[in-house]
Image: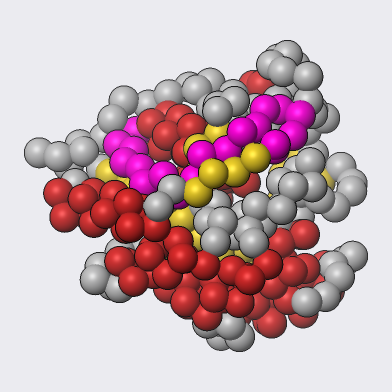
Amino acid sequence: MRYICALTIAGSDCSGGAGIQADIKTMSALGVYAATAITSITVQNTKSVQAIHGVNPLIVAEQIKAVMEDIKPDAVKIGMVNDSATIHAIADTLTFYPNIPIVIDPIMISTSGFRLMKQDALELFCHSLLPMSTLLTPNIPEAEILSNMKLNSIDDMDIAAQRILSLGCKAVLIKGGHMTGDRKIDRLYIANESVQTFTHKTIDTQNTHGTGCTLSSAITSFIARGLELTDAIAAAKNYLSQALEAGKDIHIGEGHGPVNHLFNPEKLITL
């Protein structure tokens, strides 16, 4: 007997709403044992990111190796990666474990506008990490960077997705949370397959800190639990909507507060 396990490779958020902290809360709430490899330590709160201190890339690689060889996670999520050396370390280490599903949340710019991935790391990210992904989950600003175009409509999302798929990833979920309207539309693109749309009502709240981290961790958790990609995304979207709804009126911090990750936590699932 063992727990279902997922590994998150990401930065630490001292305010607890995003990054490693959001990943652990999400995975735990969904009954999945969470292991971590920390890529950086951030100085941030609900209002802004003030500083980033990267962890030595060798230590990042050794964290991943330690978890992969002992805990043997069922899926991996990659979040914030700040620099080229760390991208190299992650990609080189994960090549030794080729059959594990990898969900990448390409965190590049914070909600407050702080650049979270150095400019010179972007090209390496696209060439080395992105092709390893089972799923890439960019929001609109991130998809604009990856596709080198502006996104103002669903048609724009479709064009951008094809550009991103051409970089080598197997599937891309472009999240429409930055678009206005009473419905949020996410679009899933898989090479040589029909586009799938996920629609949820817009929840009126400023507590949106860490929603991208939460969604990608939830998708990773459901993949670890054995769901197919489309079903994992649908289940994760439902979880995030409920977490947003449960936390929409809570006051934590003076800026964009977190979602309520633990609105209905499950027991750890064993196999």
Please name the residue shown 69% across and 82% down the image.
Answer: 163
109 horizontally vs 233: left or right = right
- The answer to which image quadrant residue 4 occupies is top left
Q: Which percent across, then down, holds residue 8?
A: 40, 47
Q: Give how far across and how far down residue 38 sits, in percent.
A: 41, 44
* Image mark count: 0
Can residue 219 be seen in the rendering of this structure?
no
- Give the left or right position of residue 184, taking residue 137 as reference: right
Viewer-proximal residue, 233 or 36?
A: 36
Residue 213 in view, yes or no? yes
The quarter of the picture where the C terminus appears is top left
Q: Residue at x 36, y 47 (%)?
A: 37
Does the magenta segment cover residue 40?
A: yes
Nearest the viewer among 98 and 255 is 255
Give me the residue at 59% from left, 25% from top. 15
Q: Position of residue 188 (x, y in %)?
A: 62, 66
Q: Which of the 4 image quarters holds residue 185?
A: bottom right
- List the single residue furthest toward the left: 1
- Residue 83 lies, in percent from the top left, at 54, 61
Say above or below: 238 vs 100.
Answer: above
Quarter of the image that includes the N terminus: top left
Magenta stretch encompasses residue 266: no
- Is 256 located above or below residue 201 in the figure? above
Left-right relation of 89 to 137 = left
Which of the pair 66/258 is nearer the observer? 66
Q: What stretch of residues is rendered in magenta?
A: 30-50
Of residues 66 and 182, the one drawn nearer to the viewer in this rendering: 66
